[in-house]
Image (cartoon, grey):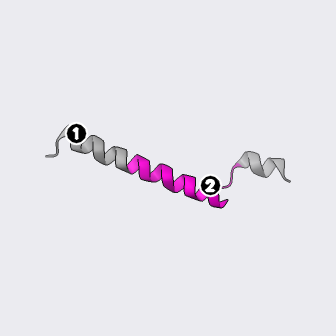
Amino acid sequence: MTAPGDLQQALFLRLKSDASLSALLGGAGLLERPTDNAAFP
């Protein structure tokens, strides 16, 4: 069984990697937002 601290660290690392991944996609223009599409029909 893992300690609560290890579980928190693993969750934090995953959230951090997910955030950086989405930021990377957004910066590359691969992540489309409905509001952006509506602004440019």
Above or below, 13 relative to 4: below
From what the image shows, is residue 10 above or below residue 28?
Answer: above
| Residue type, label 2 | Gly
Residue 34 coordinates in the image, percent (x, y):
72, 48
Q: Secondary structure at mark 1?
A: helix
Q: What secondary structure is the stretch in magenta mostly built from?
A: helix
Residue 24 magenta:
yes
* Mark 1 vs mark 2, CA separation in Å: 31 Å
Q: In percent of the image, x 41 and y 47: which residue is there?
A: 15
- The amino acid type found where label 1 is placed reads Gly
Q: What residue lies at 75% left-to-right and 45% top-to-bottom?
A: 35
Identify the residue position indicated by label 1 in the image: 5
* Marks 1 and 2, the one that precedes in the sequence: 1
Q: Determine which residue is flagged by label 2.
A: 26
Q: Residue at x 29, y 40 (%)?
A: 8
Q: Is residue 3 left or right of residue 9?
A: left
**Residue 6 placement (x, y as % from top left):** 22, 44
Q: Residues within 10 Å of mark 1 (few under 14, many from 20)?
A: few
Magenta range? 14-33
Q: Is residue 30 visible?
A: no
Residue 9 is left or right of residue 26, and the answer is left
- Please check the rendered image and state whether residue 18 is part of the magenta-colored stretch, yes or no: yes
Residue 7 place in picture, x, y as percent: 25, 43
- Element assignment for label 2: helix
Query: What x and y, as percent, mark residue 41?
Result: 86, 54
